[in-house]
Image: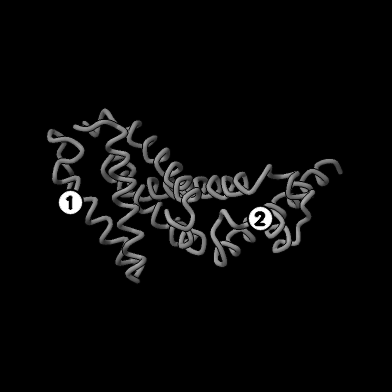
Amino acid sequence: MKKCTIKSKDRRVQKTRTALKQALTALLKEKPFEQITVTEICSYSRVSRITFYVHYGDKYELADDVFQDMVRIAKRDFCRLQRENNVKNDPILGCENLLECILNLYCSQLPFFSRIDSQQNPYLQFSLQQYVFRYVRFYIQKERSRLKLDYSLRQMTGFLCNGLWGFIRSSFDEKCPVKEIGAKAKDLLRKVLQAGVLGSSDPVSQS
């Protein structure tokens, strides 16, 4: 009986949090993040303010939880891609898989990502960049000895994150098909690596 009660409580918690996250995403279509209030989020999700504050201290914690969900999704997707096409754990192919999981995440969460820009939602833009930056930095740090970097870890991470993320965003703005964006982004990454950005002494495979 106790286990059933715990599971039921967990489902209620998850349902409430999901409703609040969906409300935030929907409200972002109407106004910038800074103008959205907790009251509006509660009204849209039909969750009381008391219940909201049981789960989150403010709307910033709610947004942070949204990003943490995305990180978990991206990690699962990356592990899947590595199992499927990178059993030898090639670091260059790993970079391509990292790019693909970021693109997949962007496509699956398009209603949320499409509202994130530096002018209307600077807080969300900054937070997203930090999460992506940390994740990519972790991978590069892990593979650093095999990648033979000519540049600092921070420089490489910033280049990959800001450059490729900007490419993906610009491609969506230009209404490019998703498959085309993925193919072009991978092609761009491959050409960058072949140009010796990672390290002049590190040959890039042609797989």
The kind of residue tagged 1 is: Lys
Q: Which residue occupies the foreground of this view, 123 or 16?
A: 123
Distance, label 1 to label 2, CA atoms, is 45 Å
**Residue 32 location, x and y as percent?**
54, 59
Residue at 58 percent across and 60 percent down: it is: 25
Please name the residue that numbered disc 1 is placed on.
191
The kind of residue tagged 2 is: Thr
Q: Which residue occupies the foreground of this view, 37 or 44?
A: 37
Left or right of 86? Residue 55 is: right
**Residue 7 location, x and y as percent?**
76, 46
Left or right of 72? Residue 36 is: right
Q: Which residue occupies the foreground of this view, 185 or 159?
A: 159
Secondary structure beneath dot 1 equals helix
Q: Viewer-nearest of labels 1 and 2? A: 2
The picture quadrant where one finds residue 183 is bottom left
The picture quadrant where one finds residue 171 is bottom left
Residue at 45 percent across and 50 percent down: it is: 125
Residue at 28 percent across and 43 percent down: it is: 159
Please name the residue that numbered disc 2 is placed on.
37
